[in-house]
Amino acid sequence: MMKEIETRIKEVVKDLFTQNKIDLFIGYSKGSLPLTSSPCFITKSEDIEKLVWNSFCSNNLAVYLPRIFNPQPRKKEKIELPRIGILAKGCDARSIVVLIKEHQIARDNVFILGIVCQGMGDRKKIRNDIEITGAEEKNGRITIVDENKKEIELKREELLSDCCIECQHATPPIHDILIESGNQRPAAPKGGGRDFEKKSIEDRWNLFQEEISKCIRCYACRQACPNCYCRECFADQTKPRWIGVTDHISDVMFYQIGRIFHQAGRCVDCGACVRACPMGIDLRVFTHKLVRDAKELFDYEAGVFLEEGLLLATFKPEDKQEFISEP
Amino acid sequence: MMDKNFEPRIVAFLCNWCSYAGADLAGVSRIQYPTNVRIIRLPCSGRINPLYIVKALQNGVDGVLVSGCHPGDCHYISGNLVAGRKFALLKNFLVHLGIEPERVQFSWVSASEGPRFAQIVKKVVNEVKEIGPIEKMVKRL
């Protein structure tokens, strides 16, 4: 199935280039390590063979779009925008919807090649005491080769990322061409941070502290997030300087609270920040709270409907007023 | 451990058109309310960046009170309604992380509600006194 999708992607991209519909295609190529894929930028049809499709095409490619469309801030003369083709899984396409709604992408200049996603694997789910020297994927099974040339067979389902297991939008909400991939996987109930929420307030704070104390403030989560396109991030601002330059946990918390809260009503739960984190912080426990609240309080899901107003720029008369303290 | 004489420091972000005038009315009417509250006037509750609230906590404020016009009465038509969504999400989020819900409170106070303003301040001060000085989030070097 994976191979068929890969051939189909190549066909479509080839057509796009021969019909001169796009200047650039963003997809995946083989990663430098087994069980990884890297984002890949294709500008000429000879390079199409580089494209791959497998169970580890997990990066959210939408992250590149705002950067391509806004290369120079405040340029007065009209510049011709590039025409971009992009491979989009459900979450990528939702990110694209969010970015279109926030006027960061010119919809007419983006060709979305949607794929019904079967969930992507997480390399970190494999026991970390084995060194993976090779890997092969066939019919829903992944065979990895360790340093002693011993083969270990794993089921694809066992390796799925947490956000993919709970994903309810495997089909891209917008697309110009859609590639089917067989039956849609049933989504597990949304759970990110549910157990966490049941704990007492002190336990929650201690766990939050524990997780955040791992953070080295490398800002990889910000760089990987398609929603973080601000030209000047609050974390980098000097007037006002929001975050102190120390490694004090309070500063780190302030960064994380600020970053995560900026995703309110925009986070599509693609898991890019979790994957990008070099310290393995389980950021989903915190990010998913806002996703859930947006749904429960305001019946809003980010990146699903293009016509719907943005969560924090609109209101409804029936919005709940439970947060108000009455005297 | 609790200090009986603990006097919390509360920062109140008030909108210029309703709540600030409400606080003013409370003062002009000589209604007594605790002096723990430090008022910061803003053009509208919609002007409040959620980071202000988090920053206040980080700087060692024991509680934050945010108040704006009642829904429908905003000087800028809908500033408070848009802000309301932010506040609801922020409050839930901070509580999710383990910050006491009493530390960050929101209310609507109109320009004619001097007594109500005094009551809200009393309530916030009493609740914060109850839970004691802020320990979480504060930056102590």
Image (cartoon, coloured by chain):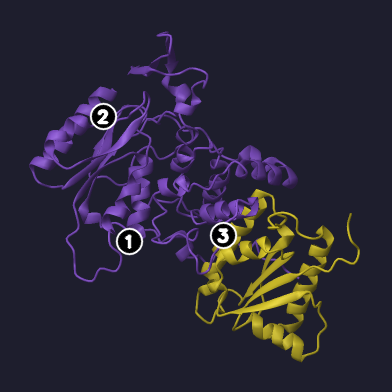
The lab-note entry on whether marks 2 and 1 share a chain reads: yes
Residue placed under numbered mark 2 in the picture: A52
Which chain hosts label 3? A
Q: Earlier in the sequence, mark 3 or mark 2?
A: 2
Residue placed under numbered mark 1 in the picture: A103
Q: Amino acid at mark 1?
A: His
The lab-note entry on whether marks 3 and 2 share a chain reads: yes
Residue A4's x, y, as percent? Answer: 23, 24
Q: Where is the C terminus of chain B found, in terms of image quarters?
A: bottom right
Residue placed under numbered mark 3 in the picture: A243
Q: Tell me the element at label 2.
A: loop
Disc 2 crowd, CA 10 A, few/some/many (<14, 14-19, 20+) = many
Which chain hosts label 2? A
Task: Spot the purple chain and give its letter.
Answer: A
Disc 3 crowd, CA 10 A, few/some/many (<14, 14-19, 20+) = some
Above or below: residue A208 compared with residue B72: above
Residue B28's x, y, as percent? Answer: 75, 91
Q: Is residue B121 left or right of residue A121?
A: right
Residue A124's x, y, as percent? Answer: 48, 28
